[in-house]
Image: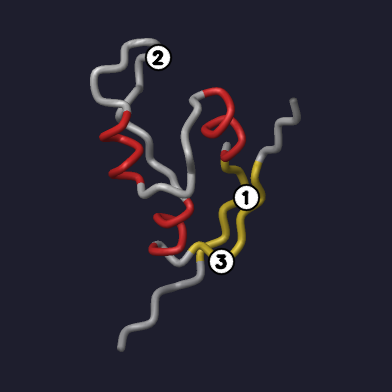
Amino acid sequence: MDKKPLVFDSHLDLAMNALEWNRDLRWTTEEIRKSEEGMTDKPDRAKGTVSLPSMREGNIGICVATQIGR
């Protein structure tokens, strides 16, 4: 079995994706993109690139995420 390298991401806008874009990061990236098809409120709808399952799949071991409190 091939081992994937452990990736350290030092800046990831998880809070912005969740709060500003109203994305449920527990969904897969594909589910998020599908749920946004046809939306026009933001120019990059249906082009999301991050989700917690995708991070697990990519072997992201540590993430320093931006936090936004409301």
Tell me the CA gap for discs 3 and 1.
Answer: 11 Å
Left/right of residue 67 with respect to residue 48 in the rendered view = right
| Residue at the extreme right of the image, as rendered | 69
Q: In the rendering, at what x and y percent does residue 65 appear?
A: 64, 45
SS under mark 3:
strand
> Within the image, what quadrant is residue 54 found in?
bottom left
Q: Residue at x 50, y 62 (%)?
A: 60
Label located before the other in sequence (1 or 2): 1
Label disc, if present, on residue 44 of the rendered structure: none
**Percent of width and height locating residue 35:** 31, 31
> Three-letter amino acid code at disc 1?
Ser
- Check the image and name the residue furthest to the bottom: 1
Tell me the kind of residue under disc 3. Answer: Gly
**Residue 24's x, y, as percent?**
48, 39
Q: Secondary structure at mark 2?
A: loop
In whole angstroms, how far apart are the C-alphas of marks 2 and 3? 30 Å
Residue to which mark 2 is pinned: 42
What is the C-alpha distance between the residues marked 1 and 2?
25 Å
Q: Is residue 27 left or right of residue 19?
A: left
Residue named by callout 1: 10
Query: How many labels were placed on the picture?
Result: 3
